[in-house]
Amino acid sequence: TKIGSSRVGNEVVSDKRSGKRWLVIAVLGVAVLAFVGVSVFPFVGAFNAPQTASSPTATASPTDTKQQLDDTARGYEAVLQREPNNQTALRGLVDVRIQQRDIKAAIAPLEKLAALNPDQADYSILLAQAKQEVQDPEGAAEVYRQILAKQPGNVNALNGLVDLLLKQQRPEAAVSLLEDTLKTGEQTNQIRPGSVDLLTVQVLLGQVYATQKRYGEAMAAFDQAIARDKQDFRPVIGKALVLQEQGKDAEAKPLFATAETLAPPNLKDRIKALAAGPSPSPAVGASPAPGSSPASSPASSPAATASPAPAASPAPTASPTP
């Protein structure tokens, strides 16, 4: 799961299509974290989420909405002046800052929440994403590495750090991180079984190779993942996309069919769309089709746009009062 913004370049059309499709496999692949039991902090993804009709401020005018959010933020801040460690107020303040799109102001309460909950990596994950959003990649990387030092198998942290390294044009560092995780993961799992999801890490590695057009290494990584679990659709569709990118549609077709059979119902249509091939690029200046979303929203990491549905955020026990 991930914070970011779309970036449009002037690359060759084929390269743009390739990048977009590997963003989709990222969505289908590692972001199927829901199926490996990875929890996601309630606020993850909310930085770019539009307000819905269910929001208490959705029907208010922009001026009224801003005033309500400002008042709510002041209320939480008043509570925190009296009780600096009040986690309900800290969470509420983070939520308000997200609605205000003031990510920089959300960092301080997130740092407090992360410090108060050292064993709950979700707060730190969101903190790292926030730091990345405000152009502090070094700070984000430091937070991710702190998480991985304690939880080497934390897929969300691995995914975030890999994405960060790729954005910094450091693919070899991303590959090294994942390969080291696979090596140490075997030992870690002998001590604490299930600590590192080796299959998901293997899929991540295959995706990194694929984004770098290192197709032979990508196929090898996906084959190793398939060997770990022949019932998991993720490495199968990874192989299919690698073949498709190379124009080997006949070889890719049966793999897409297998992946569709193995995939959960809510992803079958997406796999069918991938099997059909990339859509023609729209003419310059053309408007996107209704209901479509940018291929790179809201983050370009493997897990970013397809985080599992978040659990409900903790309900405040009392409204903040100045």
Image: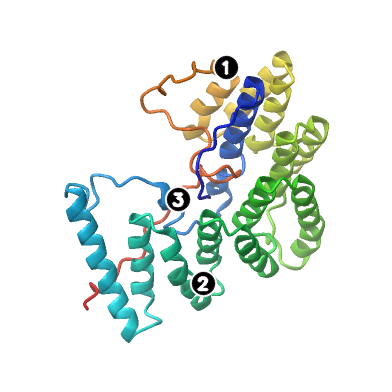
Q: Where is residue 3 in the image (x, y as percent from the top left)?
A: 50, 50
| Cα distance in 3D space between marks 3 and 2 | 18 Å
Element type where label 3 sits in the image: loop
User: Which residue, given by chain and number where applicable, does mark 1 sit on?
Assistant: 276
Which quadrant is home to the C terminus?
bottom left
Figure coloring: rainbow
Which residue appears at 46% of the width and 71% of the height?
Answer: 108
Pointer 2 with pointer 1, Cβ within 8 A: no
Q: What residue type is labelled 3?
A: Gly
Marks 1 and 3, how far apart in space? Answer: 29 Å
Q: Mark 1 near mark 3, Cβ–Cβ under 8 Å?
A: no
At label 2, which amino acid type do we have?
Answer: Ala
Image depth: mark 2 or mark 1 in front:
2
Label 1, secondary structure: give it: loop
Q: Which of 98 and 314 is in front in this view?
A: 98
Mark 3 neighbour density, 10 Å: few (under 14) some (14–19) many (20 or more): many
Disc 2 secondary structure class: helix
Q: Name the residue under label 3.
A: 45
**Res 220 → quadrant:** top right
- What residue did someone put label 2 on? 114
User: Where does residue 289 sit, x and y in percent of width and height?
Assistant: 40, 22
**Percent from the top left, x then y, of residue 285?**
44, 20
Disc 1 marks a residue whose amino acid type is Ala
